[in-house]
């Protein structure tokens, strides 16, 4: 097979650019991209972290993921705008529609990143097409992107991260030495702060230094994940541009509460609200799960988790809730809690499944849950809620960023 | 022209072929009275989809207070709202 041509299209400061374009369309005079500004969560609800930053904000040393409070200290005249995920979905969908005109082989990697297989373009024509795509997005949709081009997904992704914004970069295997190896090792995909620390500890500071290590040595030291990053450092990666999403392996939701929860009853209500969401999502993809795990974070940011494998897979809100309640009661030591999470894994198709002799199986309950799902789907999530949430101040269904729409999340699998 | 982006009440024609055609609209004046403006001519209309949000943009001409004025209207497809964008 000939060498492939892969594009990686990455929106520059996605949330912020989309918000800026939307605001300009609605008559706002200032372009958020030209002033120090961030998209940040609501501080009063304790969701106050930086989700995206403008390039002028970056110059103040503001980092994505830090608290809005510390960002404001770095730059007192910072503009903070709230996030709006429905707007982002709309902007992202419009970009995907535009890219669809160029190649049917497309992988939506996250809300603001897309891989395109452009191997059908002969000769050097791909560069012109990359510029055309970049300029069309800027002209028609009002935001800028970086396009990285290479012969595999990893290198294309690395290339789009070079100089920003509004640029096209190539990183073919023969350019690795010159363009990728001098970069600091933490710039490499899959090298996070912990791996960086380990690598730095043995004097490895650039991607090139990692690439030149002996493969066996890396394996004996960092095992399988080490081989993965060693291969990435050498530009070795050959997964396909996947048009269909990978099968789901687990489903979970979490919430940071707006105040520290000290009452057991309230904690149970948060778990119930999360169970509603998790169970509904599992039923929606026609699966059932067997392993239920919960994790909580206390007010000192110390987290712990606990899990249980059921005798038979389930998609019932009630079973998931009862199990997580039990797990919670087993691990909670009474310290105030700020975060709850429930996740269900080891998924099976719900086409047919093994019943357990020891557990009750109630067809009526199953029908009831499916009917409730349908009502919620048609009339909104809050059309039918459990009465215990009335006047409680706790939302009856918690989790996820957008209501009623699946949102493409980030993934560590390229 | 100045950016206003003011929501307006609109009578428009939706025919089977073209984009919706704005006919007349009214705005609330400074002294809290309605003022009706007839759209005399649409100079051009185009669709924009900034950040994926579809809007139809119109540059129009009308006689306002006995003088010819050029201004711009916007129709937001998702919300079915009309705006006086610039005048």
Image (cartoon, grey):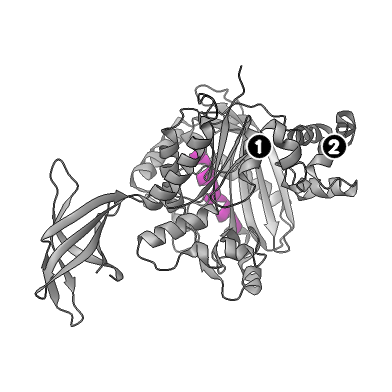
**Quarter of the view holding residue B57:** bottom left
Q: Dot 2: few (<14), some (14–19), or many (≥20) neighbours within 10 Å?
A: some
* Residue at figure coordinates x 44%, y 43% from the top left: A95
The residue furthest top is A1
Give whichever of discs 2 and 1 has the lower sequence position: 1
Q: Which residues are magenta?
A: A267-281
> Residue B40 at x, y = what percent?
10, 61
> Residue B54 at x, y = what percent?
32, 50
**Foreground of the two, B78 or A366:** B78
Q: Dot 1: few (<14), some (14–19), or many (≥20) neighbours within 10 Å?
A: many
**Foreground of the two, A123 or B7:** A123
- What residue would you read off at disc 2? A222
**Foreground of the two, A170 or A154:** A170
Q: How many numbered discs, if any?
A: 2
* Residue at figure coordinates x 39%, y 67% from the top left: A28
Residue A40 visible here: no
Protein chain holding label 2: A
Do the residues bearing badges 2 and 1 touch, measured as CB atoms within 8 Å? no
Q: Is residue B87 left or right of residue A13?
A: left
- What residue would you read off at disc 1? A171
Residue A202 visible here: yes
Mark 2 vs mark 1: in front: 1
| Placement of the C terminus of chain B among the 4 image quadrants | bottom left
Dominant SS of magenta comes to helix
> Residue B21 at x, y = what percent?
15, 52
The answer to whether residue A37 is magenta is no
Q: Is residue A76 left or right of residue A120?
A: right
| Placement of the N terminus of chain B among the 4 image quadrants | bottom left
Describe the element under mark 1 as helix, strand or loop: loop
Describe the element under mark 2 as helix, strand or loop: helix
> What whole-number distance in Å separates the C-alpha atoms at marks 2 and 1?
27 Å
The residue furthest bottom is B31
């Amino acid at each position: 097979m000939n060498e492939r041509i892969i594009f990686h299209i990455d929106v520059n400061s996605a949330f912020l650019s989309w918000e800026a374009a939307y605001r300009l369309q609605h008559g706002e005079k200032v372009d958020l991209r030209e002033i120090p500004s961030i998209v940040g969560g609501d501080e009063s609800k304790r969701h106050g972290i930086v989700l995206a930053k403008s390039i002028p904000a970056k110059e103040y040393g503001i980092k994505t993921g830090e608290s809005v409070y510390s960002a404001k200290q770095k730059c007192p005249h910072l503009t903070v705008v709230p996030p709006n995920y429905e707007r982002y979905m709309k902007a992202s969908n419009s970009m995907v529609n535009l890219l669809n005109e160029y190649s049917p082989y497309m992988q939506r990697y996250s809300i603001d990143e897309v891989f395109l297989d452009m191997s059908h373009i002969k000769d050097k024509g791909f560069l012109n097409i990359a510029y055309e795509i970049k300029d069309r997005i800027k002209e028609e949709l009002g935001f800028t992107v970086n396009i990285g081009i290479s012969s595999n997904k990893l290198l294309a992704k690395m290339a789009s991260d070079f100089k920003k914004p509004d640029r096209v970069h190539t990183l073919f295997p023969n350019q690795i030495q010159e363009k990728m190896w001098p970069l600091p090792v933490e710039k490499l995909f899959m090298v996070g702060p912990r791996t960086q620390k380990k690598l730095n500890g043995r004097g490895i500071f650039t991607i090139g230094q990692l690439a030149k290590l002996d493969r066996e040595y890396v394996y004996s030291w960092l095992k399988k994940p080490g081989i993965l990053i060693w291969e990435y450092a050498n530009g070795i990666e050959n997964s396909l541009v996947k048009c269909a999403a990978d099968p789901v392996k687990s489903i979970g939701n979490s919430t940071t509460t707006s105040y520290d929860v000290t009452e057991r009853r309230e904690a149970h209500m948060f778990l119930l609200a999360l169970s509603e969401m998790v169970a509904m999502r599992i039923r929606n993809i026609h699966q059932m799960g067997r392993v239920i795990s919960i994790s909580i974070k206390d007010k000192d940011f110390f987290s712990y988790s606990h899990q249980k494998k059921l005798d038979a897979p389930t998609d019932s809100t009630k079973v998931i809730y009862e199990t997580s309640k039990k797990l919670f009661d087993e691990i909670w030591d009474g310290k105030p809690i700020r975060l709850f999470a429930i996740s269900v894994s080891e998924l099976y198709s719900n086409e047919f499944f093994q019943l357990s002799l020891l557990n009750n199986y109630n067809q009526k309950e199953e029908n009831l849950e499916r009917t409730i799902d349908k009502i919620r789907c048609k009339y909104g999530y809050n059309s039918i809620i459990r009465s215990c949430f009335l006047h409680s101040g706790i939302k009856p269904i918690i989790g996820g960023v957008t209501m009623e729409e699946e949102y493409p999340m980030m993934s560590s699998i390229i | 022209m100045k950016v206003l982006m003011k929501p307006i009440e609109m009578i428009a024609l939706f025919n089977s072929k073209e984009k919706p055609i704005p006919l007349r609209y009214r705005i609330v004046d400074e002294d809290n009275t309605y003022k009706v403006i007839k759209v005399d001519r649409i100079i051009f209309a185009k669709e924009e989809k900034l950040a994926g949000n579809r809007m139809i943009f119109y540059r129009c001409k009308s006689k306002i207070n006995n003088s010819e004025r050029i201004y711009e209207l916007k129709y937001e497809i998702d919300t079915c709202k009309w705006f006086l964008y610039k005048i």
